[in-house]
Image (tube, rainbow, N blue to C red):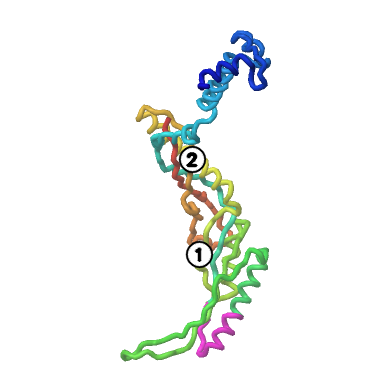
């Protein structure tokens, strides 16, 4: 029996027990398959998932280098502000209320020990005379003491003849009209050993005239700066810096001691000058 005959026979008799098996039509077999999503729906969902994944990649999964901020461009430095620098001078005067007397003693003796003892005795006389004139101890100050050999030159050679010792004092007389009386008392007490080196009229408190001089110096500097601003067609801006000259200048009025030799002579003290200089820098707007 050939193969073809065998296949026909089995299809008639049934497989594998000899019964004929009836196969439903193709359409019935398709409709009787288990329930499930249609093929077209499954394909749509797959396509949507792919589109969604692509969108996420495009919007949220970009490489880190793509989101890094670019460096800011370097900006040009701002131009320096224009400035004007000026110097100002100011002065103020005040009437003296104080006389400052520089006095001292000098003694020459054969030996240094004797010279120091002699100057000590003369200095005590000076201080006693000053105190009797009503000068307080706080207004008397020792400014120096010395001991020097004394030489005499003869026939081209130097020969020691003894020693000279001395001491200097500064005495403040707060009643100017009593300055002459103090000078006379000192010279009378010390005799040939006494020395009057100078007298100056001053103010006991230099702060007020110094403050007035500062105001004048600042006003002078600002007036100059405003003028330069107008000349350059600009406006005067903010103050940048101000420097005062070191120490300023305080000028007591020097007096010849001989002018006060007469203890009863009237005294004309004049005025004491205070001077200040400043250097000021302003911006120009």
Q: Which corner quadrant of the image does residue 180 belong to?
A: bottom right
Helix, strand or loop for disc 1: strand
The quarter of the picture where residue 74 lies is top left
Q: Residue lying farthest front?
A: 1
- CA gap, disc 2 and disc 1: 35 Å
Callout 2: 10 Å neighbours few (<14), some, many (20+)?
many
Q: Position of residue 35 (x, y in %)?
A: 68, 15
**Left or right placement of residue 231 versus residue 18 in this view:** left
Rendered location of residue 237, percent (x, y):
46, 32
Q: Which residues are magenta?
A: 106-120
Front in this rendered view, residue 235 or 58: 58
- N-terminal of the pair, mark 2 or mark 1, is 1
Disc number placed over residue 198 in the picture, else none: 1
Note whether 183 is above or below 65 in the view shown: below
In magenta segment, residue 119: yes
| Predominant SS of the magenta segment | helix
Relative to the observer, which residue lies in front, 203 or 255?
203
Give the label, 2 or 1, closer to the camera. 2
Q: Which disc is residue 218 wearing?
A: 2
At 54% from the left and 66% from the top, the residue drawn is: 102
Rendered residue at 49%/86% (across/down): 163
């Amino acid at each position: 029996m050939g193969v073809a005959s065998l296949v026909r026979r089995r299809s008639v008799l049934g497989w594998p027990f000899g019964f004929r098996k009836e196969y439903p039509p193709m359409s019935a077999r398709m409709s009787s398959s288990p329930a499930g999503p249609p093929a077209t729906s499954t394909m749509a969902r797959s396509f949507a998932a792919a589109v969604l994944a692509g969108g996420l990649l495009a919007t949220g999964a970009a490489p880190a280098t793509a989101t890094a901020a670019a460096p800011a461009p370097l900006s040009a430095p701002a131009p320096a502000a224009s400035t004007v620098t000026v110097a100002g001078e100011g002065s103020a005067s005040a009437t003296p209320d104080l006389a400052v007397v520089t006095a001292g003693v000098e003694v020459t003796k054969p030996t240094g020990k004797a010279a120091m003892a002699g100057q000590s005795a003369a200095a005590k006389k000076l201080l006693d005379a000053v105190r009797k004139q009503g000068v307080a101890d706080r207004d008397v100050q020792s400014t120096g003491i010395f001991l020097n050999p004394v030489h005499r030159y003869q026939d081209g050679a130097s020969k020691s003849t003894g020693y000279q010792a001395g001491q200097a004092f500064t005495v403040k007389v707060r009643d100017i009209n009593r300055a002459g009386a103090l000078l006379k008392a000192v010279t009378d007490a010390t005799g040939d050993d006494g020395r009057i080196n100078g007298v100056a009229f001053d103010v006991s408190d230099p702060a007020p005239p110094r403050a007035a001089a500062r105001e004048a110096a600042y006003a002078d500097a600002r007036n100059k700066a405003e003028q330069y601003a107008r000349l350059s067609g600009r406006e005067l801006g903010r103050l940048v810096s101000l420097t005062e000259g070191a120490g300023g200048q305080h000028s007591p009025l020097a007096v010849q001691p001989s002018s006060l030799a007469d203890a009863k002579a009237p005294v004309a003290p004049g005025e004491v000058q205070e001077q200040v200089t400043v250097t000021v820098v302003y911006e120009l707007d």
